[in-house]
Amino acid sequence: MNKPTQEIAGETGGASISHSALEALAGFYSAWGRRTMLQGGVLWFDCGAFSTMSVLTTVPTGIADREVRGILSRTRKLAAVYRVAAGAGLEVPMFMLRDKKYSAANLQRQFRQHVERASSFLEARECSWEEWETRALHCDRQTLARQGGSPQPGQGLLCPADRRRIAEAARAVPRLRIHACFHGEEIVAYLMHAAFGEMCEGLLAHRVDSEIDSPTRHASHLLYFSFARAAISDPEIQAVCVGRQSLPAKESLTRFKHHAGFLPEPCHLRFRLHPMLAPFLENGFSAALLKRVRVGLSGKIPALANLEVMEQAGLCGRR
């Protein structure tokens, strides 16, 4: 028997998601290659080698500290990042659209020009999972290579059997869709998104690499505009979210979303460390030391920028 729908209120006005939908979403992320866990009414997945994160962005959690520590012990992750109610954690911007009359007038001028140019060469629309399986392979290959995680041909996301498995898992998630940008028959950018109650949330976006004079140069601009317009025009949808600011922050991505007409709203994050680390690092002194290392050396060693997560855990302390 499915558990009842969980109603969770937050700064966004609340999102509703059933336990069965969370289970289906966990299956989708697992098929995609993410290690997932459904614990404490929260869906977690690995984000990097050392941390785990709660999803969805729009759903704050009420999970207790001891449960989070237990999750870290079982998964052997160093840090957990999860959404909480207002006032209980670090405030970061979450990018939302609520204007039911959303149009090109919502776009920043240069962004609008890019959309107009891309519209001359590309078509943006919802696509089927069958189209994604066969037409987005080049897009996924280039995205994985850009992220530094490209598998060998015939493995993982590039393997036809795995793509079929991902598509099957996706069909089991209620209201999970793909909006894609096509250049001819090929998908050059896409965004996977799901609706829960009155909220639509973007989950994952991939795109091809493009030269400065390529007709696919501004595919992402057209994709986000077309997706946002289609999503917010749905009578059942009152708000569209395209994620929160990452840690460390990616200013170019923040600017892109703002120029696309998405406005920042408060999202509160809590950070907790593995029980073995917490007594030593969840304090103000450790946070200051980590910040000094991060600021001083991340220019030479970019990976040290990720220390911001542990730094924020120190600032949160025992609150």
Image (cartoon, rainbow, N blue to C red):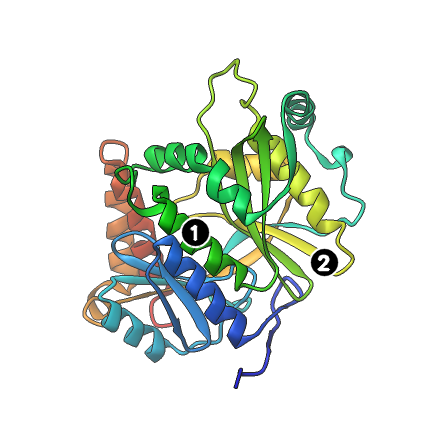
Which residue is drawn at the image coordinates 43% and 37% (left, top)?
137
Residue 28, image x, y percentages: 44, 60
Q: Where is residue 202 in the image (x, y as percent from the top left)?
A: 56, 50
Residue 297 shows in the view: yes
Q: In which quarter of the image is residue 116?
A: top right
Q: Which of marks 2 and 1 is in front?
A: 1
Towards the viewer: 50 or 164: 164
Q: Where is residue 93 in the image (x, y as percent from the top left)?
A: 55, 50
Please give the label number shown on residue 237. Answer: 2
Q: Which residue is found at the position 65% from the left and 43% from the top?
A: 227
Judge whether 306 appears above or below 174 on screen.
above
Front residue (pair 26, 102) = 26
Mark 1 lies on residue:
164
Q: In this view, does 162 lie to the left or right of 300?
A: right
Q: Residue at x 66, y 27 (%)?
A: 115
- What amino acid is at disc 1? Arg
Helix, strand or loop at disc 2? Answer: loop
Q: How far apart are marks 2 and 1 (CA)?
A: 29 Å
| In the depicted structure, whether residue 296 falls above or below residue 269 | above
